[in-house]
Amino acid sequence: MKIEYHNPFFLRKHMSCVLKFALFLLFAALSFHIFLSLSFKLVSFPHPPLDSTDLAQTQPQNDSRTECDIFVGEWVEDSIGPFYTNESCHFIETHQNCMRNGRPDTGYLHWRWNPAECELPRFNPGMFLRLMRNKSWAFVGDSIQRNHVQSLLCILSQVEEVIETYHDEEYRSKKWHFPSHNFTLSVIWSPFLTKAAIFEDINGISSSEIKLHLDELDEKWTSPYKDLDYVVFAGGKWFLKAAIYYENNTVTGCHNCLEKNMTDLGFAYAYRKAIGLVFDFITRSDHKAFVLFRTTIPDHFENGEWFSGGQCNRTVPFKGGEVEMKDVDVVMRNIELQEFDKVVKSGIGKAPTLKLLDTTRLSLLRPDGHPSWYRQFHPFAHGNGKVQIDCLHWCLPGPIDSWNDLLFQLLIHGVRA
């Protein structure tokens, strides 16, 4: 039978079949695309687990062969947000629990530190715990160290339940254990790192000058040091407080003691002595721990200090060049860098792994990340009474969580078996 292609009826029927087939293909392709999209949404995670054997995946990525300075960069908007919330983590102290305390804005939660010349991988809690199997880690210093360890605990506790095994009488020094990995994490309260007699109540009110021994380290951390695999040290704002300085159990001077018949040596003298003594202990110790020294953290009080009406009510980060460090922070940071460089260049003994956790500049750019009025629960619920403002510590979750990205990089670059 001969098919007549010129027949109009045949052509209309043929075109109808072609059109139906084309619509079928289009519908099938669209359905497949939707299926893939839904499937990706079901299986994707904002913080995907990494293979602990592939450290290369966690290295900062750049296009050049030069080493990237992960401490130089800017804060960029981050749609993913924090690992945890105030509801999923129960390690947040009341004064840093800004969301629970009624802070109305949430924009400060959606920024991430971005180095200028490379991409910084996110902290990976699963991999961190695997690397820390059968290890012990301590943060030694003041309340900013406690602030940091709580941030780390909040992230790690999303992977494994953690058990508190110790706290001192004032709940300033604490210890936790991750049973599945036999990993111990602790914070040791030692605000001066050296031996000190402190006469201050829980509200920070002093009844007398601090007695600070500049030639004796604090046994609260030197005693357990031999049992620690990793240690993060930090000085801080405590050195700005009024203090009497001792060396060889003899008064050598003081700081901020105008009413005393003593030589005011200034806080810088004491800070250099203390930091130098810590580094000397580390390098001469027979125990070679993996040590990080965290640099000073600027506060963001504006139009006054914490005791004279200073506030911090900004809601977005600074850009580079918009803010400068206060003179006191410049002095402290210079001392830290000078003493650190001195140890690295001297090569005294068989030096341990010693790294600088340089959080000063990136912290300077985050005036929006502090509790401010919201260190207290709903501070304005009963009118505008006098409220203590905190522009030094960090909200949790908040900018301090990004410190763990940096800490993780320093760790994996020097990881040991």
Image (cartoon, rainbow, N blue to C red):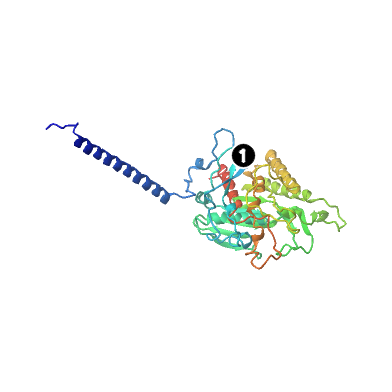
- Front residue of 22 and 60: 22
x%, y% of residue 400? 61, 52
Q: Judge from the rendering whether residue 219 lies leftward or rightward of residue 89; answer left or right.
A: right
Task: Give coordinates of residue 316: x percent, y percent.
Answer: 62, 50
On screen, 143 above or below 320?
below
Which residue lies at the image location 62% right of the left edge and 59% below the top edge?
96
Going by the image, does 119 lie left or right of 44? right
Image quadrant assignment for residue 105? bottom right
Crowding near the residue tagged with mark 1, few <14, some 14–19, many ≥20 C-alpha atoms within 10 Å: few
| Number of marks in the rendered image | 1
* Residue drawn at x 72%, y 65% as measured from the top left: 201
Q: Residue at x 60, y 55 (%)?
A: 149
Question: Is label 1 in a helix, a strand or a loop?
Answer: loop
> Which residue is nearer to you in this view: 27 or 410?
27
Instruction: Locate residue 118, reporting x and y percent.
Output: 57, 39
Residue 339 seen in render: yes
Q: Please, which residue is most extreme toward the bottom here?
A: 382
**Does residue 91 lie above or below 70 as drawn?**
below
Q: Nearer the viewer, residue 244 or 317?
A: 317
Give the residue at the far front of this rendering.
8
Of 373 and 72, which appears nearest the observer? Answer: 373
Q: Which amino acid, by three-letter code, is at mark 1? A: Asp
Rendered location of residue 191, percent (x, y): 70, 56
Task: Identify the image quadrant of the N terminus.
Answer: top left
Q: Which residue is the site of mark 1?
A: 69
* Res. 412 image quadrant: top right
The answer to whether residue 248 of the structure is visible from this angle is: no
Q: Residue lying at the far left in this picture: please name it.
A: 1
Hey, which quadrant is residue 334 in on the image?
Answer: top right
